[in-house]
Structures are given as C-alpha cells and as structure tokens.
Image (tube, rainbow, N blue to C red):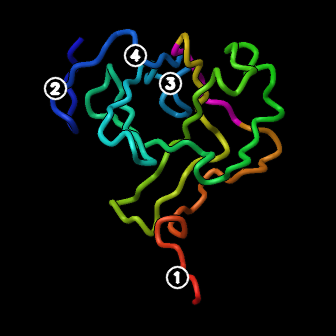
C-alpha cells in the first residue's frame, strides 16, 4: 500500500510489514500503526512512520546498542501477552529525541521501550519497573567518543 508522508513523500509499504500498537504510544494514543522506513539498514537508527498520520515519524534505536545488557526483567506478563518471552521472538525499539537537530542534545528513552512480536508485528510500549533506566539518556558520548591515548 502507498502512504503519504510529510517527511518522506509517498512511500510504498507492505500491509504485512506494518507494526500494530493497539494502545498507541504513550502520549500519542492515536498512533497505532507504524511502518519502518528503511533508509540505512547498516546504521543504528531507524525511522518509524505513523501510517495514519502523515506528519508523524519517529527516530528509533535498539536500546541494546546503548546498553548491551539492557534488561526487560519485571515485565514478564507483558512479554507473555505479546508471546515474546524468548528474546529471538522480539524486536525492541526506543524512541529518540533530537531537539532542533542538535546531536549533542539527543536522548533515548530507555525507560519505556516498544516491544514488538517479530511474527505478528504487534507490540506495545512498556514502562520498565523500578526506574532502573532513564527516560532521557544522553547519547552524545556514543557519537563522539573520547580519543584513546596511545
């Protein structure tokens, strides 16, 4: 199917590739269908375009890129409801905030990842317990690592 977007123009997506979030995104309950816009499959970041809202697109990042031992413990019931108890069955994405395109102020929401069943393409945004991760983790240090002394 073709969808119109303000950021990417008209794009063609497969209906089978649409990610369904029945509960929407926190603060944006109306965003229930998203399409991953493949721009750079090698990179860390992906654009997720809201299918039904042409002006809404989100930058996402797999939180395990930032925190290699990223932990979803404490949300076992949600994982079971999505049928993604096994890590290989799930895709995890965290929303990225990029204020006014300033890379030095870019943050990632590690507290409330979107977890998606790879087979059914259904997912939900889950708030992790105990606030063990921040809602706005600055990733500038990952983009501009300090030089290594010789």
Give the percent coordinates (x, y) of residue 54. 26, 28
Looking at the image, is mark 4 or mark 2 nearer the viewer?
A: 4
- The quadrant in which residue 92 appears is top right
Residue 86 in the image: x percent, y percent? 73, 22
Is residue 65 rendered to the left or right of residue 8? right
Name the residue rendered at 59%, 55% in the picture. 136
Cα distance, mark 1 to mark 4? 41 Å
- What whole-number distance in Å separates the C-alpha atoms at marks 3 and 4? 20 Å
> Relative to 68, is 6 above or below?
above
Q: Determine the secondary structure under disc 2.
A: strand
Q: Which residue is mark 3?
A: 29
Q: Nearer the viewer, mark 1 or mark 4?
A: 1
Element assignment for label 4 = helix
Alpha carbon separation for disc pair 2 and 3 = 24 Å
Residue drawn at 40 percent across, 48 percent down: 43
Taking depth in this image into account, of 43 and 110 the one nearest to the observer is 43
Residue located at (40% from left, 16% from top): 17
Q: Which residues are magenta?
A: 121-127
Residue sitting nearer the eye, 100 or 35: 35
Is residue 124 covered in magenta? yes
Q: Which mark is residue 17?
A: 4
Question: Which residue lies under the disc numbered 2?
Answer: 10
Q: Which residue is mark 1?
A: 147
Element assignment for label 3: loop
What residue is shown at x 22% (from left), y 30% (from top)?
A: 5
Which sits earlier in the primary sequence, circle 1 or circle 2?
2
């Amino acid at each position: 199917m073709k969808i119109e977007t303000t950021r990417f123009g008209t794009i063609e997506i497969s209906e089978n590739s649409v990610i369904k979030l029945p509960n929407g995104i926190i603060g944006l309950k109306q965003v229930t269908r998203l399409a991953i816009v493949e721009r750079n499959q090698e990179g860390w970041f992906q654009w997720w375009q809201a299918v039904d809202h042409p002006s809404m697109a989100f930058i996402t990042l797999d939180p395990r890129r930032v925190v290699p031992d990223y932990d979803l413990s404490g949300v076992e019931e949600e994982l079971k409801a999505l049928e993604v108890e096994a890590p290989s069955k799930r895709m995890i994405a965290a929303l990225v905030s990029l204020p006014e395109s300033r890379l030095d102020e870019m943050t990632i929401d590690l507290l409330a990842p979107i977890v998606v069943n790879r087979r059914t393409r259904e997912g939900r945004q889950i708030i992790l317990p105990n606030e063990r991760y921040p809602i706005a983790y600055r990733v500038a240090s990952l983009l501009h690592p300090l030089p290594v002394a010789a």
